[in-house]
Image (spheres, rainbow, N blue to C red):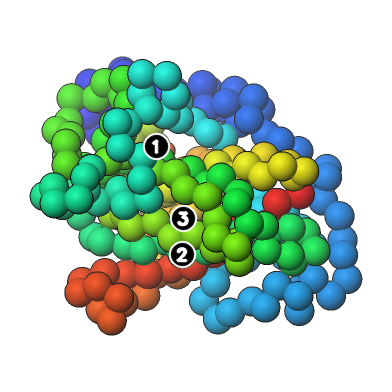
Amino acid sequence: MDDRLASVTPSTEALEREIEKYRFGAATRRRIIGGAAALLGIGAGTAVASAGAATPSMTAGPFYPSGGDIPAHTDPDLVRKAPGDPPATGQLIYLNGRVLSLAGEAIAGARVEIWQADAKGRYHHSRDRRDVPRDDRFQGAGVLNTSAGGAFQFRTIKPAPYPLGGGSVRTPHIHMKVEAPGHDTLITQLFFEGEALNGADVLLSRIPRTQHSAIVIAYRSSDDVEAGSRSGSIDIVLG
Ligand SMILES: [Fe+2]
């Protein structure tokens, strides 16, 4: 690993503190509601929390876009900043999902925000000062409100891994924040099924194995949607 990178990236200890800071207590607020799985209408290949359980929360990390780090464009197409702009580098992916209550009811109008590294593993954030090239075509973050059926779709690219201090590497992941009136705000991270680095990821490994299916998404080829794209889906459950 490049020592220059280690010296300017957040330490594992710093991330630990972030975990505590941003943990919204999903585990303690979890309620069991019988029959929720049936109400959810879970489709094959959709990542979803256990019946009656909220999606596990995770740290927002140091690169949450706020203040001067909010991109000029925040539409749900992160692949290009504005229509007609050249596309970002990377594997094109569609991140599809629904936002649901613990009872499995769709939550319309929920605010869903994602942010992630680009195909070089670089965040478009002032706190990411690593000496690696940045793909300036990539938007870095996006936000939308769910449809009447609670659905959302982002068009983005698969983020690359990036180094942490101490020699560890973050496996590819997409950060997500979901807010809806009357529900707990959720901050979490979404992972890619089958990724070699998943098993060693310092933050994913803190989530009990039984909950991984709620945040690890299987992406499949979706040339019918757009040539060369891969698509995955997730049901986000708010407490
Ligand atoms: Fe991250």
| Mark 3 touches mark 2? (CB < 8 Å) | no
Pick the front one: 86 or 47: 86
Instruction: Decide: is 6 above or below 123.
Output: above
Query: Would residue 106 be found to the left or right of residue 182 on screen?
Result: left
Give the residue type that dot 3 points to: Phe
| Percent of width and height locating residue 68 | 36, 18
Q: Residues within 10 Å of mark 2 (few under 14, many from 20)?
A: some
> Which residue is identified by label 1?
168
> Which residue is identified by label 3?
191
Instruction: Decide: is 100 above or below 56.
Output: below
Residue at the image position 52 percent from the left and 27 percent from the top: 15
| Percent of width and height locating residue 218 | 45, 69
Pick the front one: 61 or 41: 41
State the SS at label 3.
strand
Query: Would residue 12 be found to the left or right of residue 179 on screen?
Result: left
Q: Quadrant of residue 232?
A: bottom left
Instruction: Decide: is 104 above or below 19.
Output: below
Ligand 1, image quadrant it occupies? top left
Return the disc, 3 or 2, that comes first in the chain's sequence: 2
Return the disc, 2 or 1, that comes first in the chain's sequence: 2
Residue at the image position 39 percent from the left and 43 percent from the top: 142
CB of residue at label 3: within 8 Å of ligand 1?
A: no
Give the residue type that dot 1 points to: Ser
Residue at the image position 80 percent from the left and 64 percent from the top: 103
State the SS at label 2.
strand
Q: Residues within 10 Å of mark 1 (few under 14, many from 20)?
A: some
